[in-house]
Amino acid sequence: MESRLSFDDVAWEKSDDIEESWLDFLLDEDIYNEIGLFLAEHCSPRQWADFKLFKTGGFNASFLMTFTDTDASGAILRFPIPGVHMFPEEKVRNEVSIMQFITERTSQTMSITVPLIFRWGERNESPSKLGPFIIMAYIDHERSMSDLLETPGRQPKQRPELNPDISTTKLKALYRELANIVFSLSTLSANQIGSLKQTGKSAWEVGYRPLSISMNEIVRLGTLPRWKIPTAIYDRASSYFEALAELHISHLQHQRNNAIDSADDCRRKFVARFLFRKLVRDRELRDKWISYEHGPFPVWCDDFRPQNVMVDKAERVVGVVDWEFTYTAPIEFTHAPPWWLLLEKPEYWTKGLDDWCAHYERRLQIFLQAMMDCEEDAYQTRNEPLEESQRLSSWMRHSWESGDFWIMYAARNNFAFDAIYWNKIDQRFFGSNKSDDNIYDVWKKRLRLLEPEEKEIMDKYVDLKLQENETRLLSWDPDPYTLEYMAKMEA
């Protein structure tokens, strides 16, 4: 498979060091006890029975407190991990808003159960000023949906893999549970692209920029300065896609380490990004894949996947967690079928992209059948006729067959961009990308499509990127709390 843009290994090491040190810091006896007292105080008058560090990993550290009244759920206190979350205060605010929004709207649409929020606050309100926090109800569950889908016996450090021996009947049943959530989210929308804000009782509007998981990661592992992340709210789909295209370019310009292999590799990466931006700027090209320029813009969760879907002993969904990177987005995101049907992302598939596609397409047909069943049930409940254009399953099938799926995936995944662009997007819009000499030299045939100023930018950065690759210095712009914690580590 095409080489992808690697994480800056110097930034990755620093992020890991901060995370490990901070998690050790949480287990300091005084800090640990202060956290427990803080949580118990906010759950009063209930009497606590047990308190422990419940879960770490991903983006958060969570503490669980259970109570003597065993019929009631426990409480979770969760902190974003410094060095991992680059926008912790913004992340907590956005997550709280979207969870409250979904909870409020479940009576008007199909049910999505999210944790009930007891309290949330900023860093200066937290114990030992550990960071912004959320106190929420614990969703009692047996396991995650991912546990039911993946190959048995996977070790913690192993990449996830869909169980190849799972029966079609069981797979469809599990996909049906997931399709219900995807369909429900598709019914919640706004007239702008961004993060939600409550403006009154049962009144919501898009009040902040759309903070995506990719935006966090290109600051954390791609060393993009924080100020380069867009701050706008978007009224048109094309405006947001152009902002994402610009982010791909800025990311390549700013990442110091592991961004390129050679001068030609640098040019090749710039050509791909300029042409991707051209897909948005050129009206004729754009009209081939953007169908809803002015919305509606459904709720979209970047981190929604089977691992975050909790199930009971009967393998029924009891709740969905981790809503931190959720915002309203172009409907084309929702129209693309989920990448997680195989659990593993295409860029990490060991046998290459073509093999991933072959396995994915077989599973996609089962998921689409499950989605169609979900749609039938939903519209029978409403006693409304179901037009083909109203079927999410039909749009998903079209997105996969047309290749729109890959545009959405490339737009949202900065580090996977190059592999996806050259294998799945370039030839569709700009003709054959086969080269008489070498498949990796096709970018030279595309130079004629670039604007003069784009060629100037490319030439300017080639030498600079080669020099930066030799320094191995860290150019990092984390949030103020992470910087303060780094200073404590080095003291």
Image (cartoon, helix red, strand yellow):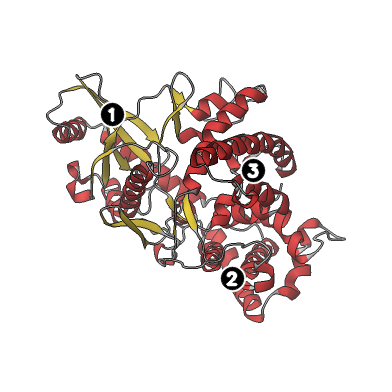
Residue 207 higher or lower than 382, as above or below: below
Q: How many marks are shown on the rendered structure?
A: 3
User: Label 1 vs label 2: CA separation?
Assistant: 49 Å
Residue 460: x %, y % from top left = 60, 75
Q: Crowding at label 1, few (<14), some or many (≥20) Cα neighbours within 10 Å?
A: many
Which residue ends up furthest to the left in the rendered image? Answer: 45
Locate residue 341 relative to residue 449 in the image: left or right. left
Query: Can the viewer see residue 401 in this picture?
Result: yes
Secondary structure under the numbered disc 1 in the rendered image: strand
**Tags 3 and 1 in contact by the CB under 8 Å rule?**
no
Secondary structure under the numbered disc 2 in the rendered image: helix
Which residue ends up furthest to the bottom in the rendered image? Answer: 452
Tell me where residue 468 sits by quadrant: bottom right
Residue 21 higher or lower than 189, as above or below: above
Q: Which residue is mark 2?
A: 461
Query: Can the viewer see residue 413 in this picture?
Result: no
Which residue is located at x 66 percent, y 51 percent?
A: 399
User: Label 3 vs label 2: CA separation?
Assistant: 29 Å
> In the image, what residue type sits under mark 1?
Leu
Residue 103: x %, y % from top left = 34, 42
Residue 346 bears which disc, if any? 3
Q: Earlier in the sequence, mark 3 or mark 1?
A: 1
Residue 51: x %, y % from top left = 24, 25
Q: Which residue is mark 1?
A: 64
> In the image, what residue type sits under mark 3?
Pro
